[in-house]
Image: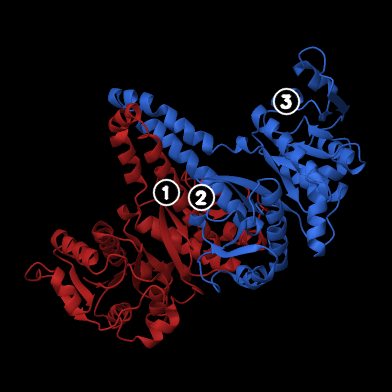
Chain colours: A blue, B red
Amino acid sequence: MRIAVDAMGGDFAPEEIIKGTLMSAETSPDVQLILVGRKERIEPFLAGSLPKNVSIFEASEVIEMDEHPANAVRKKKDSSIVVATRLVKQGEADAVVSAGSTGAQMAAALLGLGRIKGIERPAIVTILPTSEGGKLILDVGANMDATPAQLCQYALMGSIYATKILGISNPRVGLLNVGSEEGKGNELTQKAYPLLKEAPINFIGNVEGRDVPYGRADVVVCDGFAGNILLKTAEGLAGVLFDQIKEKITSNMVRKLGALAIKPGLKEIARMMDYAEYGGAPLLGVNGISIICHGSSKSKAILNAIRVARECVQVRLIDQIRQDLLK
Amino acid sequence: MRIAVDAMGGDFAPEEIIKGTLMSAETSPDVQLILVGRKERIEPFLAGSLPKNVSIFEASEVIEMDEHPANAVRKKKDSSIVVATRLVKQGEADAVVSAGSTGAQMAAALLGLGRIKGIERPAIVTILPTSEGGKLILDVGANMDATPAQLCQYALMGSIYATKILGISNPRVGLLNVGSEEGKGNELTQKAYPLLKEAPINFIGNVEGRDVPYGRADVVVCDGFAGNILLKTAEGLAGVLFDQIKEKITSNMVRKLGALAIKPGLKEIARMMDYAEYGGAPLLGVNGISIICHGSSKSKAILNAIRVARECVQVRLIDQIRQDLLK
């Protein structure tokens, strides 16, 4: 198996991307890893010679976070994400992993790999850490104004992913909505509900924002706008609360001593909430495996993302989705 | 000034509603409070005689949480929320406060009081506790599919409320969106952005979900669907995190001792996050003051909601909105 890694994408690229790739090379000697990017910027971070199962594939350009995704992908044909995606298209790699601009990665995948037949729009998946383990949210930003039929396609793809990759059998699919009863919601969710009831999935009805962090659904389906609001609100609130806790439990000497004692407990929570444990998730619906990582991924996240890529290839995720759509 | 309180609405009605009303009667002797509901269910919670500034107004029916709001309001003409709203309409009260079914309260207000001229749809306001104090979010559920023009009306009303009631001068208005640049978002936010730029408000552009808990805007404008998702996700995540903290910091003896030392710090945070501090907020856009409280309001929240009602009357909120719309 060969996995192309976009060495130039992400807030901590190329150093942390390379570190994660080298860690993966050691733990998975059977996987061939291809670092895609500018050789001269990659080489300084390689301690001496390359491991046998790591190679460098030159790509002279880099797409920056502030560039217009689709334009940049069309213009910079030798950028790391475009080249890495091309390797998948040409069968020279089985998957691509990137922590760079999500928009550019999506544009590169749509232009380079195309969509799976029967899928109108791809969806960006996120694994949200919850008190019941990681749960799938999709879409979190690929497609702002989805149609009811597209939400059904997300539900189908999300179910397959939850089953095959997260190992959840018969995953509970919930429709993100403002109330639990059928008939609640905006035009989109009101129309999507009856379609989801008929779909070959384990549809449990509507889930509200407050249900999601409690892990009451394994797969949460929503349009990219609502998904993005949910995800980023959760991120922001967790950040604020941890900041506040840090401040309030160290504001005097007694509290500081107490903080020392409970620190391991807080670390356990921080670890539970750490997206890096999940590494990344594929852009579902495109005709190939393209794993999207958080922009601020460090080596551990990249290591885990490569593991996810590997699992997607092993279970033949694309074929599974294709087969399910034919049913 | 006279304020009608829906004694029958809320998870802890009538006991906690009555308690809060009596507390308010003591601290605000100049306000006449009218408990609206079934006398026989109210009287057992009155310790002896009524304070001079509290009276009971009989309403024989109650709208339950699971009833269809508009139907229930049309059918139960002698329900506490309908009667209390009618008192405002007839000039016998200056405001109504309720912790009952939000849908029923909205239907009662729309049917009983009507809309302010120039406002197409009312908006439910919430004060979200943030690390920078309470910030306004609207709409959080009155109107699921808003138009760009309606978002502008929310922005205007929210600005007036933030200025007059929260005491924020020149409040920063943000459009809830998925990215900071103009042009980001779904059809609604893309079209609302240029309108907001032209509106007579202090528009600071898009704010993302993660910006909201940090208090980066004083007024966050969104459709009722997105606002509800944001609010309930924040509620759910805070709940999960506090549950986890409670569990993890008491899982052994050392941590339990530490927990004792930091407990005051955690209480400070819980207090910061407590919606009861804000009591409630008006349904903005209807032609009269109707204060919506959280369903699980206890006496403190009711006390604070009555204070909010009083302030809305004192600053002549409805007139202020009417005047601003004429500009």
Q: Is residue A313 left or right of residue B46?
A: right
Going from N to C along the chain, the mark reached first, 3 or 2, is 3
**A260 w.r.t. B250: above or below:** above
Q: Amino acid at mark 2?
A: Pro
Q: Quadrant of the N terminus of chain A?
A: top right
Q: Position of residue B202 (x, y in %)?
A: 50, 53
Q: Residue at x 24, y 60 (%)?
A: B299
Q: Position of residue A163 (x, y in %)?
A: 68, 51
Label 1 secondary element: helix
- Which residue is depicted at the point 32% across and 45% down? B271
- Residue annotated with mark 1: B239
Residue B300: image location, x then y, percent = 25, 56
Q: Chain of mark 2?
A: A
Q: Residues within 10 Å of mark 1 (few under 14, many from 20)?
A: some
Kindly identify which residue carries mark 3: A27
Report if the CB atoms under discs 2 and 1 are less than 8 Å apart: yes
Q: Is residue A206 visible?
A: yes
Q: Which element is circle 3 on?
A: helix
The CA distance from mark 3 to mark 2 is 32 Å
User: From the image, which quarter does the C terminus of chain A lie in?
Assistant: bottom right
**Marks 3 and 2: CB-CB under 8 Å?**
no
Which mark is drawn over residue B32? none
Residue pointed to by mark 2: A213
Q: Which residue occupies the foreground of this view, B122 or B244?
A: B244
Q: How far from the left and from the top, in percent, is residue A11?
A: 67, 31
Q: How many marks?
A: 3
Of marks 3 and 2, the one in the foreground: 3
